[in-house]
Amino acid sequence: MAVKSKWGARLSKMKSGWLSSEQQYKEMFGASDIPEGVYVAKLQDCELTESNSGKLRIKREHVIMEGEHKGVSVRDGLNLENELGLVFCRRWLNMIGAEVPENPEELETLLVEIKEAAPVCKIRVRHSGDFTNVDVLSVVDDADDGEEGSGEEGEGDEIDLDSMNKDELRALVKENDLEIDGWRKMDEDTLREAIREAISDSKEESSEEEGEEEGEEEDDNVDLDSLDKDGLLAFIKENEIDPKDLGFKNALLMKKASEDKLREALQAVLSEDENEEGEGEGEASVEDDELLEQAKVFCGTWDVDIAEDADLDDIKAAIAECQFPEQELDEDEIKLLEALELTECIQKAKPKASKPKSIGKKK
């Protein structure tokens, strides 16, 4: 038999209200449980109001549109009666594409128009103690939720700087060799803007003459005309071609280049490599062969263990593991180590310590 309680009947009457309170909880307090990060959200409300201290402010409310937190309301406010608050208000209006009024009295009407427009935005949610702060990063257009790579020129090809935290931004700088002075000391927002400027910079002028004159000739094994932009980028990556050799300041600018520009730059570099190989290949190969034979003889003399089919790089790696007393090396062996750029393997002779002068009485 179930145990009866004097509170049971009253609690039972609350059932419908209890169930409906879940949505109200999400709207009122759910934002405090949301992890900091970037979300797609729709502006649901914005209006003038007063803070608890009587200061004029704009109250905003965004509703998250996607993910596990879909439907949760995020509320925050912009204080208007201090200089910094006014700056953030202007930034918000610019981010959502609203025309910033010259007269602040027009804000009241403008907020009504913004609320009716209900823009869908990318927002960054941050927590500061009990407060939740919202930074509006951009407006999400209808075309904005298209698939990646929809545009020819693109805006950074899948790179969403606004969604990255400080560590991710730093990794982006290092991985793409971006030339940003003092980036290690920048705060997150400053670094983000510096990266945006670096990747939107115009490309360093590549050698267009080379691309034009070599338009007909391509690498014997690769038909560049048959490759699309993704194929060209894959070819560059597979062959470890430096973006700077292609005339681009960094890898991000290279990824933003059009398909034709990439193909043209590749044609120029591949043609240049062919010419250089044709001119110096014979001479270089002869020198390398001679160096290889000398290195093998050296390893036999000094009992350095190498495989029968070892190439010059293998032999250099084996020699680099050893030390050779300078006084036991002949002149040719020293020259060989210098040619192999392995002079650090030469063990310098230690200078003999001079005997201290004996101290005694003069006779």
Image: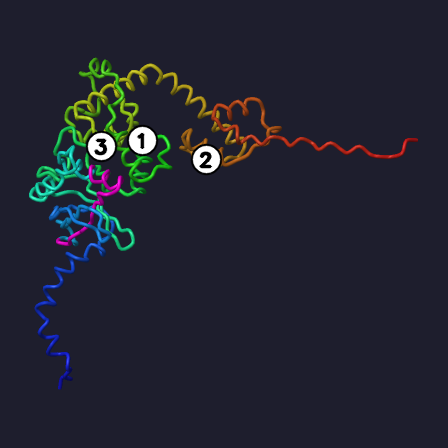
Q: Earlier in the sequence, mark 2 or mark 3?
A: 3
Residue nearest the viewer, comparing 314 with 208:
208
Query: What is the number of the mark on residue 80?
Result: none
Q: Tell me which segment is drawn in magenta.
A: 71-90
Q: Quadrant of the C terminus?
A: top right
For label 2, the residue is: 306
Instruction: State if disc 3 and disc 1 touch (CB < 8 Å).
Output: no
Image quadrant for the N terminus? Answer: bottom left
Q: Amino acid at mark 1?
A: Leu
Q: CA distance from mark 2 to mark 3?
A: 36 Å
SS at mark 2? Answer: loop
Which residue is pictured at 45% across the width and 23% down the height? 291
Image-quadrant location for residue 200: top left
Choose the circle earlier in sequence order: 1 or 3.
1
Closer-to-camera residue (210/145): 145
Q: Which residue is mark 1?
A: 178
At x 21%, y 45%, the residue is 78
Label 1 environment density (alpha carbons within 10 Å; few <14, some 14–19, many ≥20): some
